[in-house]
């Protein structure tokens, strides 16, 4: 399968999954979820879905809710007729935002220490 075709498929799947999670799911653990990235394998058999969530303390509840929603999401993908074979869905927490926040904290600490040393 061509790389362009896979990228186009990933874009459509990202939009579909985001809309489904935000507007069709009623689980309170799935509120405030952002799909940050999607990776579809070349053979279209696996779909890694990276997400972030506003409340870091509920990561386990969110992951369990997402794992429980796999059947519903596969059904929505099938209804949309985006692909013949529905891939296995794997949800992964995207740690990029969390790491960025940690770096910002470190840089702020370094900046404040440098200001104190200059005084």
Image: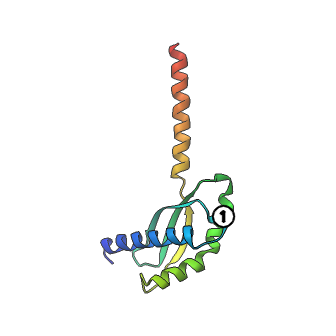
Residue at x 64%, y 52% (from the top left corner)? 56
Which x, y percent locates residue 54? 60, 53
Whether residue 20 is visible to the viewer of this picture, yes or no, is yes
How many C-alpha atoms fall within 10 Å of the one at disc 1: few (<14), some, or many (≥20)?
some
Residue 86 position, x and y percent, is 48, 82
Measuring 64% from the left and 71% from the top, which residue is drawn there? 26
Counting from the top left corner in percent of width and height, residue 108 is at: 53, 31
Check the image and name the residue furthest to the bottom: 84
**Residue behind mark 1:** 29
Position of residue 35 measured from the top left corner of the image (x, y, whole percent): 50, 63
SS category of the residue bearing label 1: helix
Up the image or down, 60 lies above or below 46; here it is above
Splitting the image into 4 quarters, where does residue 63 fall?
Answer: bottom right
Q: Quadrant of the N terminus?
A: bottom left
Check the image and report above or below for 107 versus 13: above
Q: Please say if 111 is above or below 8.
A: above
Tally the numbered discs: 1
The residue lying at 59 percent from left, 80 percent from top is 71
Front one among 61 and 106: 61
Q: Is residue 94 above or below residue 119?
A: below
Of all residues shown, which one is farthest toward the front? 23
Residue at 61 percent of width and 69 percent of height: 66
Q: Is residue 105 left or right of residue 57?
A: left
For residue 68, side relative to residue 6 (left or right): right
Q: Coloring scheme of the render?
A: rainbow
Asked if residue 86 can be seen in this view, the reply is: no
């Amino acid at each position: 399968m061509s790389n362009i075709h896979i990228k186009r498929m990933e874009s459509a799947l990202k939009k579909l999954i985001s809309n489904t999670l935000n507007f069709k799911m009623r689980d309170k653990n799935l509120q405030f979820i952002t799909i940050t990235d999607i990776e579809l394998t070349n053979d279209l058999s696996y779909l890694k879905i990276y997400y972030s969530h506003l409340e870091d303390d509920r990561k386990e509840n969110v992951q369990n809710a997402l794992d429980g929603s796999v059947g519903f999401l596969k059904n929505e993908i099938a209804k949309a007729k985006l692909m013949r074979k529905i891939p296995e869905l794997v949800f992964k927490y995207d740690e990029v935002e969390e790491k960025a926040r940690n770096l910002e904290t470190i840089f702020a600490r370094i900046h404040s220490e440098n200001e104190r040393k200059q005084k």
